[in-house]
Image (tube, helix red, strand yellow):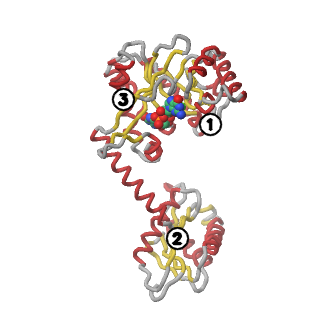
Amino acid sequence: MSGSLSGILGLVEISNGESGDMHTEADDTELHSTFCDRLSDWLRPKDEYSFVHKNCACVILKDIKSRGELELAGIKLSRIFDQPHYHLGRALPFHVSAGFTRLEGKNTDIALAMQQAGIALAEARQSTTLFKVYSPQKARNIKEESELLERMQEALERGEFHLYYQPKIHAGYRNLIGAEALIRWHTRGNEILTPDRFIDLAERNDIIGPLTWWVIKSAAFQLSQWPKELSIAVNISPALLLNDDILAVVSDALDIYNVKPSRMHLEVTEKIMMSEQERMLAQLARLKEIGVRISIDDFGTGFSSLAYFRDLPFDEIKIDKSFVQHMLDSEKDYAIVKAVIDLAHNFNLKVVAEGVHTIAIADRLAEMRCDFLQGFVFDQPLPVEEFESRYRI
Ligand code: C2E
Ligand code: CA
Ligand code: CA
């Protein structure tokens, strides 16, 4: 594969499909020979390939000049590898992924192109599409993300994360009943990063576990410092709810700081019910056994289902701010807020309205018998010292 190259360099990889345990050495040999056969079906006579290892081939697709032509080659690849292969009377499971990159000019750096195709291949493995094409912008994003992830790891060890507290106010009496803990990252560069900059990345990586365990422990400590009538709500990412460690972390934190479990609220979004409903319900039931309260966050933005009211063991609904903010100008938003409050009360659930921006909205929510209010009209999330001095704790 030397000389003057133009077109596309690709890495195509075959793996054992899903039932890896059942594979034998004979299966592996069969897999390799299927791989060879299908690669030859896919490639045109002018293309070239060689094996990087048994299950991964480097291919050169000659004279492919446009994205459209490459898409066609990719579609043909999917079609060819989509066909099942039967061996000794059973279908041999396998999975194929590919990463492509452009080769331009005469002096193409093959080592660099292999690296780029490898990045695209890694992306393809994680995705539902069979192949990905390397893009410098995407590679930059991946690099930036991996640097941010590394910095987060260090930040956690160095104590750069802080919990800010936003008051939850009783709608009728307007007194403080508790707070929502919202994470902030005080970077060494003196920036204060809000969660929209890093939570999503944390959720896509294992660091969300340690980060959330830290949040739970810090909130438990804070509860031990505050009057017994105050509660603290922490946000739990949907995937973590199924993590077995959460039960031990929550109950240990409450034990260590000697805090009544009902003072800790776990906020989860409707997304939790999108997968593994049975396990999710069992896990929620175990958390309820510990005695913590469960709130459904951002209610109305996801798959708001009436079945939640019947099936889910939760205590509180937080109506999403997108409905609350405009409820006095939009009859529809008003009707939604009213309906959710009434429905929730029929099921003995408490209701929090989020995103309360004006006293007029707060007053109307109180008339509608909404239980608790949260929003900028009272306070933004505050550092703990500021929160304590403002509310004379
Ligand atoms: P969320 O749970 O819905 O939290 C409320 C967000 O709305 C907060 O943004 C808060 O500052 C903001 N907010 C409060 N009152 C108002 C208001 O009146 N108007 C408007 N426009 N916004 C208001 P923040 O702190 O940037 O947090 C964003 C999201 O990040 C949170 O949304 C939550 O999903 C996530 N998050 C925050 N802390 C944590 C955490 O410790 N763990 C996890 N997993 N997620 C967290
Ligand atoms: Ca929340
Ligand atoms: Ca919310």
Between tags 2 and 3, which lies in front? 3
Name the kind of residue labelled 3 in the image.
Pro
Question: In percent of the image, x 44 and y 26: which residue is there?
Answer: 166
Q: Which residue is mark 2?
A: 100
Q: Is residue 21 visible?
A: yes
138 over 335 or under it: above or below: below
Towards the viewer: 276 or 148:
148
Name the kind of residue labelled 1 in the image.
Gly
Q: Is the shortest distance between ligand 3 and the CB of mark 1 under 8 Å?
A: no
Towards the viewer: 302 or 256:
302
Q: Are marks 2 and 3 in contact (CB under 8 Å)?
A: no
Decide which of tag 2 and tag 3 comes sooner along the chain.
2
Secondary structure beneath disc 1?
Answer: loop
Q: In this view, which residue lies farthest toward the bottom?
A: 3
Distance Cα–Cα, label 1 vs label 3: 30 Å
Distance Cα–Cα, label 1 vs label 2: 36 Å
Distance Cα–Cα, label 2 vs label 3: 48 Å
Question: In percent of the image, x 51 and y 26: which residue is there?
Answer: 375
Towards the viewer: 175 or 101:
175
Towards the viewer: 315 or 337:
337
Decide which of tag 1 and tag 3 comes sooner along the chain.
1
Q: Which residue is mark 3?
A: 383
Q: Is residue 242 visible?
A: no
